[in-house]
Image (tube, helix red, strand yellow):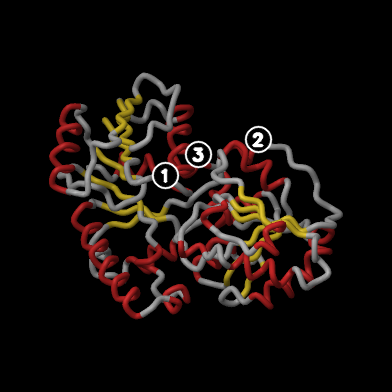
Amino acid sequence: MNLCLDLTTLSKGGGIQVAETFISDLQNKFSNEFTNVLILTNNNFYFNLNNNFIILDLKNKLSKNLITNTILINGIFKKYNINIVFTLFGPAKYFTNLKHFIGFARPHIVYQDSPYFKKLSIIKLIKFKLYYKLLEILFFLQSHSFIVETNDVKARLEKKFFFKKKKIFVVENSINQAFINFIYTERVQQKKIKILFVSAYYDHKNFNFFIDLAKKLDNTVYKNKFKITLTINSEDLPIPESYIRYFEFIGKVDVKNLPELYNNNNLVIHPSLLECFSACYIEAMFTRTMLIVPNLSFTNTILENYPFYINNLNLDDTVNIILKNFNSYYLSNKNYIFSENQISYFDSNIRTEKYINILKYSYV
């Protein structure tokens, strides 16, 4: 069986990390599962692959015209005798009559009860509703089945008209193997708060939260004793001059360097109000880093009782949690045990095997 792995929708963020890990696992431990694997990408990220992996970089060849793309892509499928297609995160940029499995990670569709939407103007909200309804139709027309990352997303999709007619599989996200191999130093006495948020820049990630947080912390006992590290560029988030000393912008971080980044920080705050899944959640959990997140259904589903929850990004709640718990956190929080529901988050091979089983045994 010949598989096409479509990565042409990926440009930044967690999708790239999922793709890199999946391809690495396929090559190193599951290379015999498919005769050939054709990888379609807009950027040639992947090197040193086995002979049965073929990379086609379609940069500047795909357009916004679905019909043109459909002719191009299906010609490629025919040339390489592709049997099944997996678009890691959709919707795709074309249509095909082949069995097409599409990964779903569009929180704007399933979490429209999020407080994020209350921040939008009426005009922008209407535009959002129309745009994502069109995306729902596109997902429906392109797909054979969907692959989501949590049962909460699956349950919500199954209530939607265009998705309840399709088969929906759940495959949990996973940390990268680099986290397993890294040797962590024990964090006991913490004199300075080193805050970390690992994410590409998107509006719903709420990066502005950190500006307000810096202003609040600057009026506490932690004045001049905290640093906020963000994996974006400084031009993405203009900081008032009086608070710029509290921020470090490091841009995109290679996945192999992420464990050290977590090891060198001691508080992860994830302020996003819209997620289907975030690797940052489970990376913080695996590295036993203090974690603060909004109290929303997608965080509860993934994290259970691990983090400190705040209501709708309430700044006073956040500061109070820090003042009350940070000093003692690494002295007392030693006994958190991952539940059975969370084990698969920490072994990417489990995720890869689930992908393979869905693609191979749901093909017929």
Which quadrant is home to the N terminus?
Answer: top left
Q: Looking at the image, is 123 positioned above or below residue 299?
A: below
Residue 164 is left or right of residue 46, and the answer is left
Determine the image quadrant of residue 364: top left
Amino acid on which disc 3 is placed: Asn
Q: On residue 354, which mark appears?
A: 1
In the rendered image, the residue lying farthest to the top is: 51
Amino acid on which disc 1 is placed: Lys
- Residue 353: x %, y % from top left: 43, 40
On the image, numbered disc 2 is attached to which residue? Answer: 181
Q: Are marks 1 and 2 in contact (CB under 8 Å)?
A: no
Q: How far apart in space, not on screen, are marks 1 and 3 (Cα)?
A: 8 Å
Label 3 neighbourhood size at 10 Å, few (<14), some (14-19), many (20+)? Answer: many
Amino acid on which disc 2 is placed: Asn
Q: On residue 58, which mark appears?
A: none
Residue 142 is left or right of residue 127, and the answer is left
